[in-house]
Image (cartoon, rainbow, N blue to C red):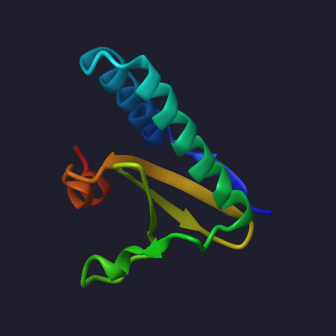
Amino acid sequence: MAQVIVSPEARKDLISIRAYIRDELSNPTAARRVMDELRKAVEGLRSFPRRGRPLDAMIAVHTEYRYLVCENYCVFYLENDDSVVVIRILHQRQECLQALFVET
């Protein structure tokens, strides 16, 4: 089994996702459901780290990133022999590539 590491940026993403759904959309039930689904998806990478698709499938530039779609979100991660590092968790409508590759 691979060790799953959630980056500080991905943790911030999760906090923002929960707050947006719970507070902005006024739907705490949906916020809990989405958080549960994202948690299951991330934890599932422990047993199946290659289950996501290579980001190369989405863009014409080689990268080691993989992504997994869960609900309306993409979980972007890097995997190696013994660990999976979740880099970002972004809504599908966000500028995902910019968020991944452009420092702000």
Residue at 34 percent across and 49 percent down: it is 72
Which quarter of the figure is the C terminus placed in? Answer: top left
Q: Nearer the viewer, residue 26 or 8?
A: 26
Position of 38 compared to 3: left or right?
A: left
Which quarter of the figure is the N terminus placed in? Answer: bottom right
Q: Nearer the viewer, residue 53 or 22?
A: 22
Residue 97 is situated, as x and y percent measured from the top left of the image, at 25, 61
Residue 21 is situated, as x and y percent measured from the top left of the image, at 33, 26
Q: Nearer the viewer, residue 104 or 9?
A: 9
Residue at 29 percent across and 76 percent down: it is 58
Position of 88 compared to 77: left or right?
A: left
Residue at 57 percent across and 52 percent down: it is 41
Residue 83 is situated, as x and y percent measured from the top left of the image, at 69, 61
Residue most toward the right? 1
In the rendered image, the vertical position of residue 65 relative to residue 31, given as above or below: below
What is the quadrant of residue 56 in the picture? bottom left
In the rendered image, the vertical position of residue 97 relative to residue 94, given as above or below: below
Residue at 37 percent across and 74 percent down: it is 55
Numbered-mark total: 0
Residue 40 is situated, as x and y percent measured from the top left of the image, at 62, 47
